[in-house]
Image (cartoon, grey):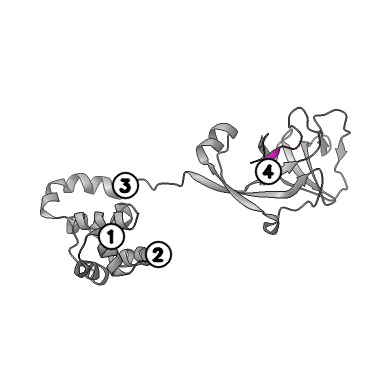
Amino acid sequence: MELKEKIKAMRESKGMIQEDLAKASGVSIQSIKRYETKTNSNITLDNLQKIANALDTNIEFFVSQCLPITKMMSPNHKNDVSQLDSKIPHLPIQKPTTIQIPVYDDVYASAGQGLLNEEYITRHIDMQRDFLRDYFGVANFLGLSIITARGDSMSPTIPENCQLLIQQSDSFQEGQICVVRLDNELYVKRLQKRPKYKLISDNKNYEDIELENEDYEILGVVVGFFKRMI
């Protein structure tokens, strides 16, 4: 995408007309029109920065793979060519610091429908990636969701009526705490794989559940829990 196309696309995504961008950036309307229509518009770095600020984006969005850095320089910036040429194309892409996690307020482990379909999502919450990484050890932020635990079968490891942070996975290890659908019920148990697949409760007042010849599906791994409702 050329620079002129990037400026126009970003402006339109903000719901702005050319006059709005000119007013917000302090760049003349004639220049805005030229920048959006001509490939070689001789835009200066000063004006490009003003436009980027007005559109609430980084100048790197416009610079990367648009045109040679020297074509955007005003005379006052000519001495900075070597520094900018080495820095701007290699600036790291800023990743979002938060992630939206779906919450299933009406889906309970140990009771209720054993489904985690999108139609059952009641809301989303924003959580800091750093918090998930540091507190729960989450390295991959895909497939996360939150459900509510019922019962004390996993006590004292998991308190009753807490919220579980679970993550979908294609592989499961011996002894992991998993969310398992069994006959349209959801269970939170430790997975035993040898010698037979079983669901084990940490609370020894509950019997093990053998999975052989049963209709079951392992939906995800419990990576943590919240004692208070969020």
- Quadrant of image for the C terminus: top right
212 on left or right of 97: right
Amino acid at pointer 4: Ser
55 on left or right of 220: left
Q: Which comes before the other along the chain, label 1 or label 4?
A: 1
- Residue 90 bears which disc, if any? 3
CA neighbours of label 2 inside 10 A, class few (<14), some (14 to 19), many (20+): few
Which residue corresponds to mark 4? Answer: 171
Which residue corresponds to mark 2? Answer: 13
- Closer to the observer: label 4 or label 3? 3
Residue 13 position within the rendered picture, expressed as x and y whole percent measured from the top left:
40, 64
- Closer to the observer: label 2 or label 1? 1
- Closer to the observer: label 4 or label 2? 2
Q: Which comes before the other along the chain, label 2 or label 1?
A: 2
Q: Element under label 4? A: loop
- Distance between the Cα atoms at labels 4 and 3? 36 Å
What's drawn in magenta, residue-wise? 160-164
- Distance between the Cα atoms at labels 2 and 1? 15 Å
Residue 94 position within the rendered picture, expressed as x and y whole percent measured from the top left:
40, 46
CA neighbours of label 4 inside 10 A, class few (<14), some (14 to 19), many (20+): few
